[in-house]
Each structure stands twice: as structure tokens, then as C-alpha cells.
Amino acid sequence: MRPPSWLGQHLAALRALLVLTVLLGVGYPLTLVAVGRLPGLADRADGSLVEADGRVVGSALIGQSFTDADGNPVPRYFQSRPSAAGYDPTATAAGNLGPESVVDTHTVDPAGSTPSLLTQVCARSLAVGRLEGVDGRRPYCTPDGVGAVLAVFHRDGFTGPVTRVVSVNQVAPATPFLISYRGVPVEPATPGEDYRAAGGVITPVRGDAPAEPAVPADAVTAGGSGLDPHISPAYAEIQVARVARERGADPAAVRRLVAAHTSGRTLGFLGAPRVAVLPLNLALDREFPIGVTGQRGG
């Protein structure tokens, strides 16, 4: 007596399940573990952990902040790139804000307000400029560190004489960055108002900032992962004077350490030159100790 056809189909499916379970559920994971144990790959597979004084202080692949308990930069250390994820490896993410994010969201409760990407860049640039003693101005930024953006209302919608102008990122009682625009007084924004929906033409104003800001782009923008362990040589350079001053070191000696921790383009043409922040700061502690252990990983 031949078994029913459905039984043969179920047995074939069971055999396929068993084979695939062995191959993909056992064989494939074990193969990857074995590959991860090969010389040159084992360290990366274990997270490229970095040790100092017998304890793990971070990873060469995951960035971290160098701040005090209040979140302020520790002056004796090179600072990392901003992170939209707060350098939390479990929350790696980009900020999901693009070039068109130029208008802040202001609510009656300030805690619910959301800065635009432009305002975040402006505020960071101003803060970095103050910390490093360089010009923190950027195009399309106000002197108080928000996006220099106007909502311009015309009599006939998009045309005709200007009837009203609002500095959308400066909330009363802030003083607008322009006194007037095309002869019309500029007023500060009111929380909760949507000036774009009300017919205002969003108009960024470049201002008189230099075309090439002194503060590099990677000092004011977060990376896509939020975990970048590197900064650009340009960002490292503007930090040299501060770090050397705080450690009582020769700036030239600090620059030599920066150069020693700078990598070129991958394969000679991919990416950009980069400075590894954590190894650089650990080298500073070895070469120029100051007697106080700074907080790592804010």
C-alpha cells in the first residue's frame, strides 16, 4: 500500500527543514565564529576594545564624548563629533534632518520646542568657536546661534509689497537679527505659530559670515551612525591650542601626537583623512599627564 501523497510532501518538507536548520542555524553561525577568530579579525570581532591602566575605556570602533558630569567639554581632551544618538551604541541613529530643516518648532511649553538642523549647526558652531577661541560664525546663522530665517509675507501671496516679516527662529523677547527687511520692521516669533502655513515665504538670510567657516563641518553635524570614533584633521587642528594650554604642553608636540593618530583615505581613495579621538586622548594622558583622571564617556 502506497502512503498518501500528502505524507510524502510533509516528509520532504521536514527533510528540507532539518537540512536548512543544520546549514543555516548551526553551520553558518559556527563558520562566522570561526572566521572571527582568524588572526587580524579576532580583535574586531570582540569589539576592538581599548584598555588603559588595566581597564576597558572604550572601543576603537565606537565614539564617545569627553565631558564632565554636567555635559560640558573637558578642556584637556580633544572633543568628538556631535552625536544624534548621544554616543549610545544601543540607540545608534541619524537625526533624520535634512537641508530643508531651517525652521524651529516653538511651542508654548519650551520643553516641547524642537530646533531645526540649521539652528543645531549654528548653536554648535557658536559653542565650538567660544571653546576654541576661533570665529564661530557661519552663513545663515544669527549672532545668538540660531538659524537666520525670515517668514516674509507679501500683499499678494508670493508677490507684491512686503507687509509683514517675522524672524521665525527667534522667540520674543529675543531681539530679531535684522531691524527691518525691505523697509518693514522684523518681529520675533510667537510660540505655536506656523508662519509657513499662514502664507509666509521662508527666506534664509546669509549674513556677513565668512564663506569658509573656521569651525569645520564635522564639529557641528552628527554622523549617520551617531557613533563616529573619528574627527577630521581640521577639527583636531583648532583644538590643539586649547589642549596644549590645559596640559602645559608645546603645541608642536600635541600636533605630532595628532599626526601619529591620523589615518589617510582607505585604500588611498575612499573616505577622508581622519583622527582617532580615543587613542589620541589616551596618548595625551601618557605623554602629558596632569595628575587628574578625566572623565571618559560622557
Image (tube, helix red, strand yellow):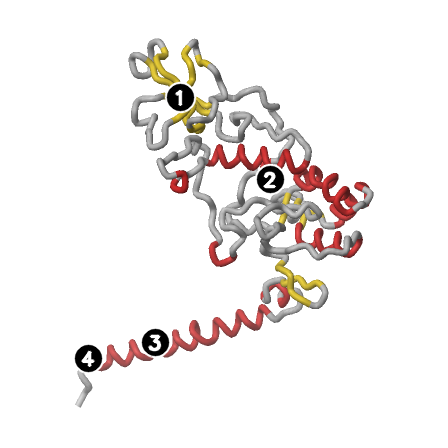
Query: In this rendering, is residue 293 above or below 196?
Result: below
Q: Residues within 10 Å of mark 3 (few under 14, many from 20)?
A: few
SS for tag 2? Answer: helix
Q: Identify whether 118 is placed above or below 210.
A: below
Tags 1 and 4 touching, CB below 8 Å:
no
C-alpha distance separating marks 1 and 4: 77 Å
To which quarter of the image does residue 207 belong?
top right
Residue 155 % position (x, y):
30, 12
Asked if labels 1 and 2 touch by Cβ distance under 8 angstroms, the answer is no
What distance separates the C-alpha of mark 2 from that of mark 3?
A: 52 Å
User: On the image, numbered disc 1 is attached to which residue?
Assistant: 166
Labels 4, 3: front one: 3
Q: CA distance from mark 3 to mark 1?
A: 66 Å
Q: Which residue is mark 4?
A: 5
Indicate the secondary structure of the residue bearing disc 1: strand
Q: Earlier in the sequence, mark 4 or mark 3?
A: 4
The first of marks 2 and 1 along the sequence is 1
Query: Could you tell me the amino acid type at mark 4?
Result: Ser
At 29% across and 78% down in the image, what residue appears?
Answer: 12
> Is residue 93 toward the left or the right of residue 143 in the image?
left
Q: CA distance from mark 2 to mark 4?
A: 68 Å
What x and y, as percent, mark residue 29?
49, 72
User: Which one is in front in this view, the residue at disc 2 or the one at disc 1?
Assistant: 1
Q: Mark 3 — residue?
A: 17
